Image (tube, rainbow, N blue to C red):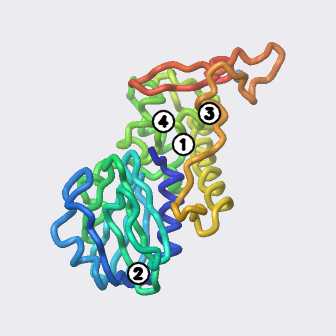
Amino acid sequence: MPELPEVETVMRGLRARLEGRVIARVRLGRPDLRWPFPPGLGQMLTGARVTGFRRRAKYILMRLDRGESVLLHLGMSGRMLIAPDDEGVPVLHEHLSLHTDDGWRVGFVDPRRFGSVDLVATDAEDSHRLLAGLGPEPLDDMFDAAVLSEMLRGKRTPIKAALLDQRNVAGLGNIYVCEALFRARVSPQRGADSVAGARAARLVPAIKMVLTEAIAAGGSSLRDYVQPGGELGYFQHAWQVYGREGELCATCPGPPRCVGIHRIVQSARSTFYCPRLQR
Ligand SMILES: [Zn+2]
């Protein structure tokens, strides 16, 4: 599933190709993805100029000159493709295609159809039902140790679960939570309300750093965020703990040596961590 940095990278790729362009033609390959496409979607898009983009959590907002924004979510398996318009037919599972006035096709490809597309008034984006309850953006300047501590106060759930709860912090997924807790040397099993003071002060920059580094990796390895096959974004990265059960972590001071990265299951998701380093 695309995580926040991948979504940010996809958004930047869409911006590079679509901002300022007019959508000359729209093709809807079916009436729905996870939910039905909003009524009038094709009409709203056809002839509209794209004025800008914004990411909120794992949602992409594409703003039109008609006062409406298109709200996109990639779901489990959604991808955005960019191709010159003369390359003909849509690819398999390309359910929505936008054809620009400068000769490009942008396609939303989603085999499993957990993705979604909706329309929302641009001046009311944050009151859309999918965005209204979200916590702060982890990369916003206002997200700091004080905000995090306040958010966690009185919460008895493990810090891992609290960080995955989108009402506390928006857009954090399983992999980046594992990585951030490792960098901050905070145990994923620690009670959320005990993450304050020095631990909160380490955790916030660790969260920002793992996200920022991943976004930067996407930006530097891809031209305009487009992969050779025309797919936007990127979905590979080297993790320090995620998926590394049994390996020695790179941070433990020795001797004695690292006891090895453990995998446990929390809220039905795998957690990877170093029990010696993370307290
Ligand atoms: Zn270790």
Would you say the beta carbon of the disc 2 residue lies within 8 angstroms of ligand 1? no
Where residue 210 is drawn, which disc sits there?
none
The residues tagged by marks 4 and 2 sit, at their Cα atoms, a distance apart of 36 Å
Task: Look at discs 4 and 1 and give the one toward the viewer.
Answer: 4
Residue 189, given in percent of the width and then of the height, sits at 50, 21
Residue position for label 4: 174
Ligand 1 under 8 Å from disc 4 Cβ:
no
State if disc 3 and disc 4 touch (CB < 8 Å).
no
Disc number for residue 198: 3
Which one is closest to the eye, mark 2 or mark 3?
2
Find disc 1 in the rendering and name its residue.
145
Say few, some or many: other residues with alpha carbon within 10 Å of mark 2 (under 14 / 14 to 19 / 20 or more).
many
SS under mark 1: helix
The quarter of the image that holds ligand 1 is top right
Q: Is residue 22 above or below residue 276?
A: below
Which class describes the residues within 10 Å of circle 3: few (<14), some (14-19), or many (20+)?
few
Residue drawn at x 65%, y 51% is: 213
